[in-house]
Amino acid sequence: MKNLRVLLPFVLGPLSACTPKPAELLAPGPATSPAASSSAPSGSSTASSSATSSSAAPSNSASSGIAATAAVPPAAVLEDRLLATLPEGATTQDILFDGVGQQVAYVLKQSDDKKVVVLGDQRSPPFDSLFTREWSRDGRHFAYLAEAQGKYFVVVDGATSGPYARCTPYLRWSPDGRIGYNADGLLFTGTQSFAPLGPVMDFHWRPDNTLTYAFKQGREKQALVVDGKVGETFYYMLEPAWSADGAHLAYAASTGKAMFLVVDGKKTEHAQADNLAWSPDGKQLAYTSRLPSAHQDPYTYVVQRGAEQSEPFEEVSAPVWSPDSRQLAYVAKKDGQRQIRGDKTSAAHDEVSAPVWSPDSKHIAFVVKDGTQQRVVVDDEAGEAFERARAGTLSWSPDSTQLAYVAQKDGKAYVVVGDKKSAAVDAAARLRWSKDGASVGFGAVVGNELRWRVMAVR
């Protein structure tokens, strides 16, 4: 099965030969099924995805299984301000804006290849490697995982925990702003820690701020722990999905002989399920599933919505629910072309990003690529052509009447809202609407200045 998120023990330490990738801050989400992430306009950047470099290819949020309106909840936008100035001649590896216009963190690469993290007036000691680095959901706290001389450290707002001999290569913020991680056989939840029942395969925060984790039993089995209770043992499990209210949990699991969809602790059916997505109201579950194929490829893929099943496709992305839980949309590939399918249908294109619903569930936006040009499409009406259009930055205004995004042309980045464009900058990221929808703020790189810019749109 292609690109399944099987829970495997992945721990940094003396025996680990794996090198984790930095977290994608603007376009988070699991891998698509099968490889739909390659179907959307995408690319790589020398900077973190939190700052859209003018030389970077766009990020894609096609892998997200929940409605991706704004990465940061709309709130009053602050005034234009200078957040930091990069040292002259410095080599910057990452620039990470907080999304609220207050702070920015960045990583400097020294001549000896060591990395230094700078946050406000705090400057870290040099590290050999940096792994996860990201802001909390409300933009108030910044955390990262670092390694120096074979030891691992977790740093939150400049306060260091460690050293640890072994540590998983990721940190996870809880909804209420606590950092979770697994190190030296303990699970840490903010300032507290506890010993799990066995080697931790993976862990996730529940919407009510409690921790759920999977642990290894014996040599080949694993089980999920929810509310302190151990679930059924399986050969392997895929990443679990909680409903938004925390009342329901679903995941796919294998006994070694058959795969099942497990919902609220009960095996409901045989299913080659992946990309599980609960509707916002928690009443419906959608997912992608593979079927045997009569063609050269051994599998075709469908989207399952309750008892309803889509027609088979060559590829499908994770399904995305509308905020009102009434509609479902996804990217599907057929006859070599991709388009939005489900309750919305678009024209076919070379590449298509994941759909982004408006807050009122009446509109849908996505990025398409045909040839070398990329455009943002709203309700099947294509906008201006750009060299790059960042799918991960698509952000609807609170009243659903306007869409903002970051685009690149002629070596510069712009924030685009309808027919309006911001002044050219070197990079832009973390769009944030004002409550009244009259302006949008964003982090901007202008020369060696890291600024918070505000663009009036009406």
Image (cartoon, rainbow, N blue to C red):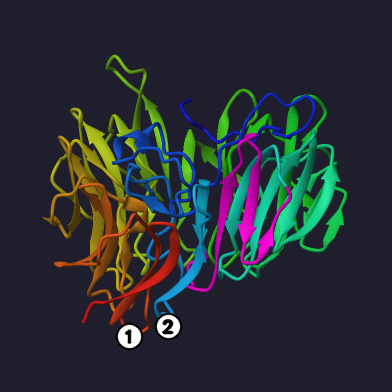
Q: Residue at x 33, y 71 (%)?
A: 359
Across and down, in percent, residue 330 comes to 31, 48
Separation (CA) of disc 1 from disc 2: 8 Å
Magenta-colored span: 98-125
Q: Residue at x 45, y 63 (%)?
A: 450
Residue 235 lies, with reference to residue 268, above or below; the image says above
Q: Secondary structure at mark 2?
A: loop
Q: 96 or 356: which is nearer to us?
A: 96
Magenta stretch holds residue 399: no
Q: Earlier in the sequence, mark 1 or mark 2?
A: 2
- Seen from the viewer's position, the closer of residues 168 and 412 is 412
Q: Is residue 299 visible?
A: yes
Picture coordinates of residue 242, whole percent (x, y): 57, 56
- Give the residue furthest to the front: 88
Answer whether residue 343 is visible to the viewer in this image: no
Toward which corner of the image does residue 199 lie, by quadrant? Answer: top right
Vertical position of residue 423 compared to residue 266: above or below: below
Q: Is residue 336 above or below residue 260?
A: above
Q: Amino acid at mark 1?
A: Asp
